[in-house]
Image: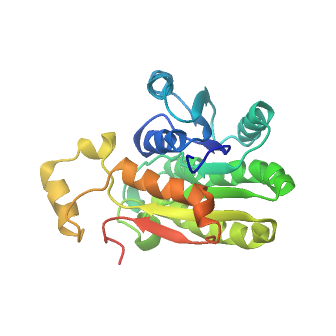
Amino acid sequence: MAILSNKVALVTGGSRGIGSAIVTQLVEAGAQVFFTYRSSAAKADALVASLAAAEGSVSAFASDAADFEAAGEAISRVVESAGRIDILVNNAGITKDTLMLRMSEEQWDDVLSANLKSVFNLTKHALRPMLKQRAGSIINMSSVVGVFGNAGQANYAASKAGIIGFSKSIAKEVGSRSIRCNVIAPGYIETEMTAELDDKVKETFLGNIPLKRMGTGAEVADLVTFLASDQSKYITGQVISVCGGLNM
């Protein structure tokens, strides 16, 4: 039996990059997966079509995770359709990198809203059905940048560090109801964004990674699948890096 059979999951920002890898693995593990996107409708449709023969099922819909009411509607849509929600993966996020002296208030607010407020929004709305079920796994995507910072990414680092503190607090609040909350902190992962980096920049990155390569979205999704399953039912409040040893 697939390890996520009979589980219902919602993944935010699931149409591309790490999000699409997470959706793919959860569906292949047998889950009924819903995922959201903001503007990548074509990619979302293509992903759904590519998983038509997978073990589980998948559907997608447009939603803005940074909008509190829209987040509530997303959770309601999942529960009304599937009858429950077992897994929430808060993956949606953006970057607007620049040095602090050049950073505008808008750049700060946009990143904090998309990356951190979105996690509050979805978690707030998902907790009610999870509390009724007395079960659930919340997985929040942070970054190694949220652990050790990075020049030119003060807004992004702050948002990802905030996710860590938020998640540890939630784990303590709802652990008695068998609801778990964990954080994944990816390092340099091969995505559309990193594919556009200059070769010299990539060489600098690789020089700092003990395993001497970038990670893949599938390797991050492996951990998501484990944390979503009952195989990790005694793990909560943890921050686990997928970074090839970068964060040691």
25 over 46 or under it: above or below: below
Disc tally is: 0
* Residue 8 visible in this rendered orientation of the protein: yes
Residue at point 63%, 60% (across, down): 230
| Viewer-side residue, 213 vs 2 | 2
Residue at point 80%, 33% (across, down): 80
As drawn, the residue found furthest toward the right would be: 132
Residue 132 shown left or right of residue 6 in the figure:
right
As drawn, the residue found furthest toward the bottom would be: 248
* Residue 103 visible in this rendered orientation of the protein: no
Residue at point 53%, 35% (across, down): 55
Residue at point 50%, 22% (across, down): 45
155 over 67 or under it: above or below: below
Give the quadrant of residue 241: bottom left
Residue 148 shown left or right of residue 107 in the figure:
left
Give the quadrant of residue 174: bottom right
**x then y, percent, for residue 227:** 56, 60
170 over 226 or under it: above or below: below
**x then y, percent, for residue 127:** 78, 54
